[in-house]
Amino acid sequence: MLHSLHKKQLIKSTITELWNFISDPANLATITPPEMNFKTLSNLKDKKIHPGQIIEYQVSPLLGLKMHWVTEITHVKTEEYFVDEQRFGPYTFWHHQHSIKQTPNGIEMQDDIHYKIPMGAIGRLLNKLFIAKKLERIFEYRKKKLEELFPN
């Protein structure tokens, strides 16, 4: 079963300033809750994301258990959107599109995530009990952190 999460927020920024922040993989640790012990393992000399870029992470989403996660940037349209897809990690499938657009009130940022949990019925139950709630908390943290970084 494919699950989805959709988040939208308005950020007071220029599109270039916000794009430069969200499209720099080194900034992901800044907007991830500290208890997840998020670490980027890849060498990020090239701060500009590009299709085909592979990024390795270590994260502890539950009970301090360390997980290795590898994503690939599959699509990039500068100052509009980019897509990361899991290649190795905790999900059977992970597709995350980050989009931004100018509005009269600021920059609208949108996250559209589609994911699948392994283990069939057990995975669906784990998603209902824990995983979906954890993802909600992660993106709520990101929202608050971005509001701090880009105050009105």
Image (cartoon, rainbow, N blue to C red):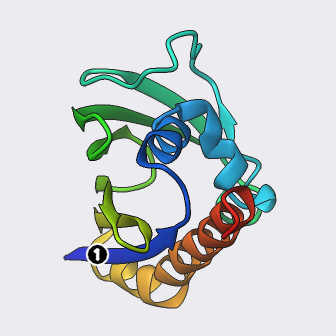
At horizontal 24% and vertical 34% (from top left) the residue drawn is: 76
Q: Give left or right: position of 24 versus 115.
A: right
Which of 13/137 is in front?
Answer: 13
Q: Which residue is mark 1?
A: 4
Q: Give left or right: position of 30 versus 115.
A: right
At horizontal 80% and vertical 60% (from top left) the residue drawn is: 35
Label 1 environment density (alpha carbons within 10 Å; few <14, some 14–19, many ≥20): few
Q: Disc count in the image?
A: 1
Q: Position of residue 151 (x, y in %)?
A: 70, 65
At horizontal 59% and vertical 13% (from top left) the residue drawn is: 43
At horizontal 45% and vertical 53% (from top left) the residue drawn is: 90
Three-letter residue code for mark 1? Ser
Q: Position of residue 55 (x, y in %)?
A: 46, 27
Q: Position of residue 8 (x, y in %)?
A: 40, 75
Q: Quadrant of the N terminus?
A: bottom left
Vertical placement of residue 103 versus 26, above or below: below
Q: Position of residue 98 (x, y in %)?
A: 34, 54
Disc 1 element: strand
Q: Quadrant of residue 124?
A: bottom left
